[in-house]
Image (tube, rainbow, N blue to C red):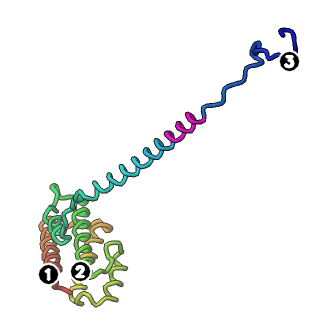
Amino acid sequence: MEGSVDAVRPPHGLMGLRPDSPPWGLLGLSLIILILLILAAYLSVRWWRRHRHSQNASRPLPTVPVVDPWRLLEQRLKALHCAQPWTQESCEEFFFELSFLLRQAVELRTNLPITGQTLAETRLSLEKSSSLSANFQQELLKFLSLAEQLKFAGILLDAQVSQQWQTKVGEWIEQFHHGALT
């Protein structure tokens, strides 16, 4: 029966081989492991982020010391000195700083925004406000006018007179601090 067509013959060459069926069990298991690894990585990242934020929240935040603005004004006033030699430029700088400190004190006490105003605008703001006595308004405007004249008209005041103005402004700031002059 070797020559008969009906006889079953073993495969000859590659043509007769059937490929093995894919190992579905192994592929399915690999897919499940991959999904579990991705899920574990996701959960680990979420846990790390939450834990990191909770650690930061449990640490006390650094505190910034509260600085009393009145004390700061007084310190800046004490640090202000008549530069030697006393020149036109040092006189202008001295009175600019002195008038700015006084404007800040008035602004702290009255809430009038005069640190950024010209003398004319300051005069209008003071006239509209009843925060300061009329006598003090006149004194304040007299000083601010003097400071402007020193800056723009080139007037030079003696250093001793400048220090007297510094003392006067210091007294005003101290009185503002304690609620006087309003």
133 or 160, which lies in front? 133
Query: Which badge, 3 or 1, comes first in the chain's sequence?
Result: 3
Q: Amino acid at mark 3?
A: Asp
Query: Which badge, 2 or 3, comes first in the chain's sequence?
Result: 3
Rendered image quadrant of residue 161: bottom left
Position of 24 with respect to 173 (left or right) is: right
Q: Which residue is mark 2?
A: 109
Q: Residue at x 60, y 35 (%)?
A: 24
Disc number for residue 128: none
| Above or below for 72 versus 132 | above
Location of the N terminus by quadrant is top right
SS of the residue under disc 2: helix
Position of 173 with respect to 52 (left or right) is: left
Position of 53 with respect to 41 (left or right) is: left
Q: Residue at x 24, y 87 (%)?
A: 132
30 or 10, which lies in front? 10
Horizontal and vertical percent for residue 148? 30, 71
The question of residue 25 being in magenta is answered with yes
Give the extent of the magenta segment: 24-34
Q: Residue at x 34, y 89 (%)?
A: 128
SS of the residue under disc 1: loop
- Give how far apart the Cα atoms at labels 2 and 3 are: 118 Å
Q: Nearer the viewer, mark 2 or mark 3?
A: 3
| Above or below for 59 versus 6 | below
Disc number for residue 6: 3
Q: Which residue is mark 1?
A: 178
